[in-house]
Image: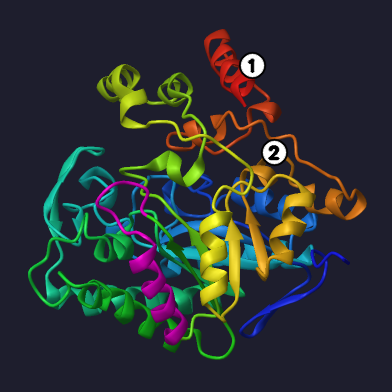
Amino acid sequence: MESKLFTPVTFGPLTLRNRTIRSAAFESMCPGNAPSDMLLDYHRSVAAGGVGMTTVAYAAVTRSGLSFDRQLWMRPEIIPGLRRLTDAIHAEGAAAGIQLGHCGNMSHKSICGCMPVGASSGFNLYSPTFVRGLRADELPEMARAYGRSVNLAREAGFDSVEIHAGHGYLISQFLSPSTNHRKDEFGGSLQNRMRFMDMVMEEVMKAAGGDMAVLVKMNMRDGFRGGMELDETMQVARRLEQSGAHALVLSGGFVSRAPMYVMRGEMPIRSMTHYMTCWWLKYGVRMVGKWMIPSVPFKEAYFLEDALKFRAALKMPLVYVGGLVSRNKIDEVLDDGFEAVQMARALLNEPGFVNRMRAEENARCNCRHSNYCIARMYSVEMACHQHLKEELPPCLKREIERIEAKG
């Protein structure tokens, strides 16, 4: 069967040159919550490497939606910098996407400027901080913030937006019974828990009009007991299909409860704490990190079994993401009926991987799944240890070698 990989694919008004997308993995390259030359250079390198579309990660729709101080915050002042970025991507022949979201309770006043807000009030152990549940009368304005961000994305030259409705961030916090304990019309039944998502999608689709593609990243499972499972997430997918979304990106996991369910493998705790500047957090995570962040075995295409159930149930375009490192597996996924595939770690390890897949039928990237890139992104920019200019301390080298030997 002839490979679909290098054939065009269309999402709403947008046609990509091939079926590969750089997924919206957080780059941590935006000091001052604004785009940097480093962010531009990285996405330009991926675009030059042959990808169909590269997605800028995790742009907050309001300041209260920031969870990191090196994260984008969508506002008019950063549009010129984003336009430079999209121009550079387009010059290499790729489309430019941007992920829009709100972190909900995954923040701290020192970053977001207020007491963090979420679906429900409570305490976030991971920040740590108290969290205020959003009032019902605040939700329409929060939904409008998503719509305004779509308009800003258009002004900045982006071709598509990806609405983040998974991974335990704000929309996901409303959807999941684990984090939504509300007693009003936005809590309780799944129909009620989907109301905020419905409001957001109404604003997003209105703002997107006929010239912006809209993708939505959602969970197939939350990844822990008491979270959402397939019976409910399938209903969420059908609601998003009805809302007019042009494609779904099928993912899973909660960064606050099951982070390695999202990414798989082991978190290199020594590497993670090496870059932390807060002394008590550094030593606290070093002592209890392996219990707070339990490992989940990595296997290639680890979400495929669940994703195939969505493919069988839905007619709309679906994008597969999760553990793709070889052309053979990508061809298999596309032959299973998925319109496109997303990758992050493979393209961090090798920005030109898509071009190499075009040249080599059995191409496989050289990512060895140590997750060092993820460990450092919470404090400094995401980077692959294989391409660092600086020398790593021996203790970090030993940790990376131990994890890679397991794989």
State the SS at label 1: loop
Please give left or right for residue 389 compared with residue 67 in the image.
right
Amino acid type, label 2: Asn
User: Front-most of 399 and 274?
Assistant: 399
Q: Quadrant of residue 83?
A: bottom right
Q: Which mark is residue 391?
A: 1
* Picture quarter with the C terminus: top right
Q: Which residues are magenta?
A: 222-243
Q: Position of residue 238 (x, y in %)?
A: 43, 79
Question: On screen, 350 above or below 197?
Answer: above
- Residue at the right extreme of this rendering: 359
Q: Is residue 226 magenta?
A: yes
Q: Position of residue 233 (x, y in %)?
A: 38, 67
Closer to us: mark 2 or mark 1?
2
| Residue behind mark 2 | 349
- Residue at the left extreme of this rendering: 183
User: Front-most of 181 and 123?
Assistant: 181
Question: On screen, 46 above or below 2?
Answer: above
